[in-house]
Amino acid sequence: MDRIDRISETLNGVVKHLAAVLTAAMAVLVFLQVLFRYVLNSPLDWSEELSSFAFVWMALLGASVGLRHNQHPRLDIFFNRFPVGLQKVVMTLVNLSIIFVLVVLSIFGVKLTLAMRMQRTAALGYSVSFVYMVLPISAVIMLVHVIVQTVQPSKRESQNN
């Protein structure tokens, strides 16, 4: 299982860097849009569209980083009141539920990506499937992280500290 843990850690590192690049790109694009629109009085047609796409990718990939560190939303006020044994059972059930949702998201994300491959974006003229492609990609990355957390609960606890 150390192999999948190494894969999870490597994916997390790559995604962190990619999310940082996407965040920086969004900031530059929005700055350029404001500069060209209000200072140069010649708005860019494509910058808003590209920054929106970067935001979608950054948000979904960033969610995988949060999941890797077990920072997904939950009701800790109730969870922490359970006995330790029940906490482990509840976490396993939660992780199995997350795995189910991620498998569904992966399958339908691929179907949606393939269905949108002929549709083009308004300003850039790229295939919309490039935007939707982040759904199955992020779902698979999150799936790897959750499998590690489910099979190796000690990893989950050490990541919280």
Image: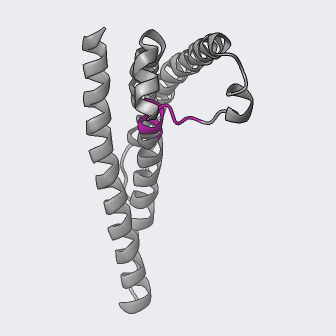
Q: Quadrant of residue 117?
A: top left
Q: Is residue 60 left or right of residue 9?
A: right
Tell me the residue at 32%/39% (across/down): 15
Residue 6, image x and y in percent? Answer: 25, 21
Q: Is residue 142 visible?
A: no
Tell me the residue at 37%/76% (across/down): 31
Front position in the image: 73 or 26 = 73
Magenta segment? 63-72
Q: Number of labelled discs? A: 0
Compared with 121, 83 (above or below) is: above
Compared with 3, 14 (above or below) is: below
Q: Which quarter of the image is occupied by the N terminus?
A: top left
Residue 100, image x and y in percent? Answer: 58, 14
Q: Is residue 83 left or right of residue 126?
A: right
Q: Quadrant of residue 86?
A: top right
The secondary structure making up most of the magenta span is helix
Indicate yes or no whether the magenta region holds residue 10: no
Front position in the image: 78 or 20 = 78
Front position in the image: 122 or 112 = 112
Task: Give the colour scheme shown.
Answer: one colour
Q: Which quarter of the image is occupied by the C terminus?
A: top left
Tell me the residue at 37%/57% (across/down): 23
